[in-house]
Image: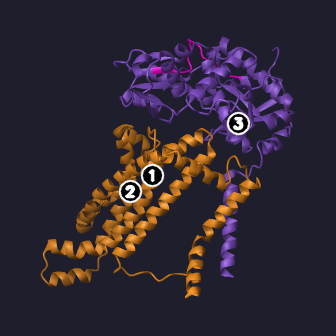
Amino acid sequence: MKRKLAAGLLLALSVTLLFGLTGCGKKDGSTAQAAATAKDGDGLFTIRVASQTGFNETQIADELGYFKEEGIKIKYTGVLAKGVTEFQTISQGINDAFIGGHPPNVAQARLAGLKFVAVAPGMVDNPKFPHVRYLVQTNSPIKTLDDIEGKKVAITSIGACTSGYLQYYLKQKGLPDNVNWTTLSNPGQQEQSLTQGLVDVATSHPPFAGIALAAGGVREIATSWDILHSPGAGLSVRGFSEDFIKAHPNEVKGFAKALAKARIWINSHQDEAKAIIANKLKLDPKDVSVFWYDEDLTINPQYIEKWFEIAEDIGLWKKGEIKPTDVYSNDYAPTSL
Amino acid sequence: MLLNALRKLGGVLYRLLSVFIFLAVWELAARFQVVNPVFLPPFSEVAATLWKLIRTGVLLDHLLISLQRSLLGFGLGLAFAIPLGLLIGWYRGFERFIDPLIQTFRNLSVLSLLPVFVIFFGIGETSKVAVIFWGVLWAVLLNTIAGVKNIDLSLIKAARSMGISNYGLFTQVILPGALPTIFTGVRLSATSSILVLIAAEMLGANSGLGYALYFYQSNIKYPEMYAIIIVLAVIGVAVNYSLAAFEKRTFRYREELPETGSV
């Protein structure tokens, strides 16, 4: 009797534990749809996204009223915890759209079984606003990327735009890949470690690259532009789950259109855009790094192919496991603004 | 005879029953999609992934470097904490002096100190070992102090009345008397050296179980992530049980608590 009771209790406990741990979401986005379908009293369709800690065009589109023009309202649901992906929160029904990340992230989510599709481009690489800057100490003997052999290079994690670009560079140049990669996942830790002399090179991303250069003691030896010479090297993408797109194609189109307007506006109004973000994040505008945005209305297939090439090179997945065309769709992109 | 063996087998199985039920619920919940199987892959799939990690040698690489860090931090922690604890327990005045500092430090979370460890010890092996050292230090230290302080006073008096020297008192009465309590601290620390390892391996690591856990999570490889979690659980349990067995053999003279409950 006692044993049965104990076993029963345990069963109940493990069931609760399992459900609690996984948020009880049965299928991708099904709960997301249920929550988002309901329009609010103002007649606007709510799309939920993760709160941002840096520059993002979604906030600009929101501030300029571009979403409202499309009958959409943006709701910020909180900053992502460390290691948690937007794809996870969308599948759990917390968010609807992902507004961060590069094409390989979408590919990895799809490989894991989470069917997401990018519907809009975000920032792109630009010689004046580089996606990655390779920084060394001012007095470092490292002059160019050719000198990184055998050196300690900091990365946030193994990824295309961290170790991937450099490995691509070394391969192009026929140099051996014997770099000592050092993972420093906390924001700003790479730059701090570089200043302390704990690493030789930082693969610095905005806003930390700008902050570190302004603080002094470090210099730039090259940027991602020098390696790939393509706007695609910085491409971020924004999108939804397949289920959400199927259920709300018009809202997805509206979302993509609002973002497209914002991208073009930001490139021609960088100071105003910085001021908006600084105000929202309660930062000094000089501490906000602005990005260069893709002015194309659609996602450029060549950019995605390049990302795939690099991701496959560093073994994020095997060639052929997923196709570049699987991760994006231009069916929801605006044809005119 | 046979009945006895069966009863014994039943006993062993019953002890493992809770684990089996948990695994079964896990498997079924994922199989029937009660929970999203992407986020909680069935146990069988995780087990298969674990086997793959073992077969390809990936796991062994991570495991060896992690164990090395854990053992080093743990060993240094013991080497420092036990002598210090004996000293503090022996000299009451010193204890009154140092106790507030110990209490403050011991209540500082290792996680909150991670940035400090990076500043002082950099991002190499030193900082990782230092984090583990900090993580194991307190349980051993406090148990050692308690062990010395709680020795039966009549034993000390008896030894004194036989004219024992201070050195003899320490080696023949205090140390053997305190050992069981010290060992409890060691056991607690051994477990925490594994737990703290995860935090330590987020400091500029390229290998180790903590690094693997972070890597698989951020690359959306959930079966691998769960496989690493299982490995960590198994290590924790193995360390704890083997130390408990060692304790039982070594300190037979220590009184056992009567078993509670009738199960």
> For the residues marked 1 and 2, what is the alpha-carbon distance in whole angstroms?
8 Å
Q: Which chain carries label 1?
A: B
Q: Mark 3 lies on which chain?
A: A
Give percent across and percent down for residue A13. Answer: 67, 65
- Which of B101 and B32 lies nearest the eye of the viewer? B32
Residue B111 visible from this viewpoint: no
Name the kind of residue labelled 1 in the image: Val
Residue of label 2:
B136
Q: In this view, does A329 lie to the left or right of A290?
A: right
Q: Are marks 1 and 3 in one subunit? A: no
Chain letter, purple in picture: A
Give percent across and percent down for residue A217. Answer: 38, 21
The N terminus of chain B is located in which quarter? bottom right
Mark linked to residue B196: 1
- The first of marks 1 and 2 along the sequence is 2
Q: In which quarter of the image is residue A219?
A: top left
Q: What element carries label 2?
A: helix
The C terminus of chain B is located in which quarter? bottom right
Residue of label 3:
A110
- Which of A103 and B45 lies nearest the eye of the viewer? B45
